[in-house]
Image (cartoon, rainbow, N blue to C red):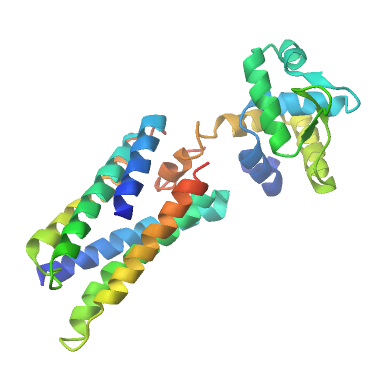
Amino acid sequence: MASMVAALFFLRFWRDTRDRFFLLFAIAFAIEGINRGLLGLTVVSQEHEPFFYLVRLFAFGLILMAIVDKNRSGRSR
Amino acid sequence: MVDDIIPEDVKQFILERIDSIAQLEALLLLRDSPQVDWTANAVAKRLYIGEQEARVILQRLCADGFLIASPEKSLVYRYHVRSPDLGQTVDRVAALYSIYLIPVTNLIHAKPRTRVQEFADAFKLKSDKD
Amino acid sequence: MAGLIIYGLCAMTALLCAWLLLQAYRRSRYRLLLWSGLCFAGLTVNNMLVVVDNALGPGADLQTWRLVVGLLAMLVLLYGLIWDAD
């Protein structure tokens, strides 16, 4: 659940800086947090279940999107 | 080009400790008269800033080891650096600022509004200073 | 198989983040960059372990290592966010 706490911090940074980069990170970490929580609740290691790795792909995809977006707009905010 | 004028360690110092021109001016103002006690009101009048802003700046400079607070009266400060090294660095900054006003102010103005913005800026693949 | 590729991609994304953050830390010494860089380095390892676990075959189980590394990475990030965000 540390991911959820990190997500909350990123939400606050988004509020402080209005830079949507932090919003994307917040959502990515929140999704990963929920994903890992669900993974932890299953009895057998389920990383190979499509649901879990697709959700992780989505979360990391958001991070990549944040990086691409940050480099495209060129403004620091 | 700006990068060559200001030595790296001074640049680090400014980036880490100086958040605004007003703060730098306040620091140098108190440094110019180290025997004098300054109130936030007096600093505000000299620098043409609000008293609240002056108070925050002085508190911050005091917390960072540049000033000491007067033991008798509250919110009164004078210039007194925590260590000789710090004093030397401030002297260098003062000298640089007097000669290279524009590069130093540009450096300070280029700082992100809050430090956390540097986290997001770390992901910029190319530098935007030119 | 698709899962392994995806975990590999996630590892590379995390590696990119770690690289960018640690490079920026070298330049500006802003400590949050160090902690978050280390966190993403840990997440890189965390994702790679899934691939390695699979490659090592059914005998190996790196699940515990994955949990430990993942947890450590997040704790380092949280430490940085709480104390060194400024």
Name the spot of residue B69 as percent of width and height, x first: 79, 30
Residue farthest to the bottom?
A: C59
Name the spot of residue B67 as percent of width and height, x first: 78, 33
* Residue B1 appears in the rendering: no
The relative height of residue B82 versus residue A48 in the rendered view (above or below) is: above
Name the spot of residue C34 as percent of width and height, x first: 49, 56
Give the camera-side residue of C64 and B129: C64
Which quadrant does the N terminus of chain C fall into? Answer: bottom left
Position of residue B36 in the picture relative to residue B63 (left or right): right
The relative height of residue B61 versus residue B88 in the rendered view (above or below) is: above
Position of residue C16 in the picture relative to residue C28 (left or right): left
* Residue A32 appears in the rendering: yes
| Numbered marks: total | 0
> Which residue corresponds to the image point at 17% horizontal and 68% vertical from the top-left?
C5
Give the camera-side residue of C47 and B9: C47
Name the spot of residue B100 as percent of width and height, x first: 73, 31
Position of residue A53 in the picture relative to residue B17 (left or right): left
Position of residue B57 in the picture relative to residue B31 (left or right): left
> Which residue corresponds to the image point at 61% horizontal and 40% vertical from the top-left?
B15
The relative height of residue B101 versus residue B47 in the rendered view (above or below) is: below
> Which residue corresponds to the image point at 50% horizontal and 31% vertical from the top-left?
B113
Residue farthest to the front?
A: B72
Residue farthest to the right?
A: B35
Give the camera-side residue of A30 and B15: A30
Quadrant position of residue B74: top right
Quadrant position of residue B99: top right
